[in-house]
Amino acid sequence: MSSNLNGPQVLLCVNGGIAAYKAVEVLRLLQKADCKVRVASTEDGLRFVGAATWEGLTHQSVASSLYGWTESAIPHIMLSEWADVVLVCPATANTMAKMAAGIADDLVSTTLLAVPRTTPVVVAPAMNVNMWQAAPTQVNVRTLRERGVRFVMPVEGRLACDAVGEGKLASVDQIARAVLDAAGSRASSRTMAGRSVVVTAGPTHEAIDPVRYIANASSGKMGYAIAAEAARRGARTVLVSGPTALEAPVGVERVDVVSAAQMHEATLRAFEGADVAICAAAVADYTPAHPADHKLKKAHEHLDTIELKETKDILAELGRRKSQDGRARVVVGFAAETNDLVANAQAKLERKGCDLVVANDVTRSDSGFGSATNHVTLVSAAGIRELPTLAKEEVAVHLLDEVERLLKRG
Ligand code: PMT
């Protein structure tokens, strides 16, 4: 197996069909081309090519069930985030129907549903001619293509059922080439290898007493998407996270914190020796000045006024420290705004010594706290660039492209 750690990571999803044996050849071609390949198989797929074959070739266990996999308790998330490219080969009519409808009822279909939008998916179908030409199959193929799924279309020939017609798996060379094409951008985009990135994410909790706290509605999604993208580009990535319900992205070192003070300390420590800091966390600006060490009693202790004190501004401190050791470092802040978006972001850019501020419109339902999408404007000394409403994963791609430009500029 290839030991080139910089090659693209391909997740091969095998379905139950006679053409599964040809997926073995595709895997070999991909390995020869320096890809790291992992295999996930449906139970039916394993009837055609057994786990021993895949494990012998990849030196890794095959994932075939959502439960009991030795490598991860949540295999569908681990595998979908690990992959630079996903290949479904051979793809059955059943799996394509599940992909089109969003059905997740086994490991492979659940993994396919969890694939980030920015990860290319290549599908190589193989089946009986009537099943291929059936109206539901053709509708599903069209739907998936419209969503950006790449197809290596089946060809005409003698099929396993002895029928002659369309439905034969495309050549293994063609399939491997399609995967390498899809991986091209990813493979050459390990552009942050050797860099070190710190990302803050999520809310902070500021204790009033042992059971009450001041918090906000940040889910952590934006910061986690940035950390995942930085890691995918090969950067050593530390994610300083306030309390969230999210899993740490693959390849990211997560440091869990609760309060603004803890986030301040952990972020500054992680920033020593780092090239980039991106502050997407919604850090409390104020914290109770005298948190009680016992649960306050409504009847005889005052809960109507809580004395607050200002927290330390992490971003401003990073802005001050970024040029201390003479290295070119990039500091990025977010600005969650309800009005005067760009003007407020420009003021923050200057006041906090940032290279870039992501002005975040938090008045829209498709943007800001908790949503899957975000509507942002990138504000830097070089200018202002408003992005359309995008999945947070896609915002992360644009943001890191900009960070890389700033790093090059030095
Ligand atoms: O987590 P999600 O649900 O995905 O939502 C994403 C988000 C809306 C939280 C995120 O996109 C965002 O806008 N984060 C910044 C929220 C915020 O607190 O903005 P602010 O304008 O109050 O702070 C400005 C900047 O200073 C931010 O980069 C913040 O991380 C930083 N800050 C603020 C206070 C403080 N004490 N220290 C800081 O570093």
Image (cartoon, grey):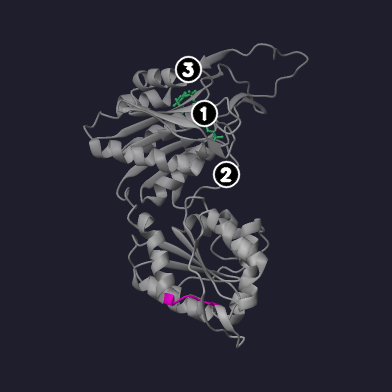
x and y, in percent, of residue 52 in the image: 52, 80
Q: Quadrant of the N terminus?
A: bottom left
x and y, in percent, of residue 351 in the image: 36, 18
Disc 3 and disc 1: Cα gap in Å?
A: 19 Å
Ligand 1 within 8 Å of the CB at mark 3: no
Residue occupied by mark 3: 340
Residue in the picture at 38% in, 23% down: 316
Amino acid bearing label 3: Asp
Near mark 2 (Cα within 10 A), the count class, few <14, some 14-19 or many ≥20, is few
Q: Residue furthest left?
A: 326
Q: Are marks 3 and 1 in contact (CB under 8 Å)?
A: no
Disc 1 and disc 2: Cα gap in Å?
A: 16 Å
Secondary structure beneath disc 2? loop
Q: Report if residue 67 is visible in the image.
A: no
Residue in the picture at 44% in, 41% down: 396
* Left or right: 253 as drawn, with respect to 6: right
Q: Nearer the viewer, residue 155 or 253?
A: 155
Q: Report if residue 303 is visible in the image.
A: yes
Ligand 1 within 8 Å of the CB at mark 2: no
Q: Nearer the viewer, residue 9 or 171?
A: 171
Residue occupied by mark 1: 282
Near mark 1 (Cα within 10 A), the count class, few <14, some 14-19 or many ≥20, is many
Task: Tell me the number on the disc at residue 389.
Answer: none
* Left or right: 16 as drawn, with respect to 250: right
Residue occupied by mark 2: 246
Of the numbered discs 1 and 2, the one sitting upstream in the chain is 2
Q: Over which residues does the magenta segment extend?
A: 167-172
Residue 194 higher or lower than 352, as above or below: below
Nearest to the eye among marks 2 and 3: give it.
Answer: 3
Secondary structure beneath disc 1? loop
